[in-house]
Image: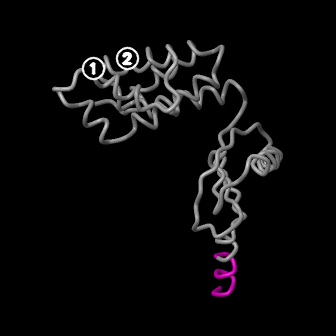
Amino acid sequence: MAELATIARPYAEALFKASASDLNGAQAWLDQLAAVAGQPELLQVAANPKVTPAQVFDLIAGLVPQGLPEAGKNFLRVLIDNDRLAALPEAALQFRSLKNAATGASDAVVYSAFPIDAQALQEVSATLEQRFGRKLTTRVEIDPALIGGIRAVVGDEVLDTSVKARLEQMKAALTA
């Protein structure tokens, strides 16, 4: 079987072309759909020959928190009918890459030991955009192991100002 990236590419490209007028809206429902469809238990149910494609569609569409627009429903039907549901999370990643390339943006993941409020996240995003020299789409993930501070990942670049990183630097300096 071909790699998921190869299978997902035409779906991501077709969705990108079809959603050119509302890339952010398409990205929002596609991320929700990918989160639901990426669950191994759901893929097992979908692979069961006793479960019809209509039942799989109803199950997945019912699990998407905000519901799906008509384009999302059509996209999901195509993936189910072509037995490509497992490629949905990869298609979402490739769609995001296409969208970022078109808008000149990059994804940034900010790891924090504590939740970050909207105002602080806006300030962090502005600082990171200055630091990395490009527009960023920022999301936050909680990582209590950091103790404090943040760790920002943009593509293959990392900016780590966490307490954990500083403690590791001091440990390395003391043991050297």
Q: Is residue 14 visible?
A: no
Q: Earlier in the sequence, mark 1 or mark 2?
A: 1
Q: Which residues are magenta?
A: 168-176
Q: Which is more toward the observer, 82 or 147? A: 147
Q: Measure the C-alpha gap from mark 1 to mark 2.
A: 8 Å
Q: In the visual, does 52 lie left or right of 61? A: left
Image quadrant where residue 90 sits = top left
Name of the residue lying farthest toward the left = 50
Residue identifier under label 2: 77
Q: Secondary structure at mark 2?
A: helix
Q: Which is more toward the observer, 71 or 66? A: 66
Numbered label attached to residue 53? 1
Q: Secondary structure at mark 1?
A: helix
Q: In the visual, does 10 lie left or right of 54? A: right
Q: Which is more toward the observer, 162 or 176? A: 162
The amino acid on which the numbered mark 2 sits, given as a three-letter code, is Arg
Q: Residue placed at 71% from the left, 26% from the top?
A: 103
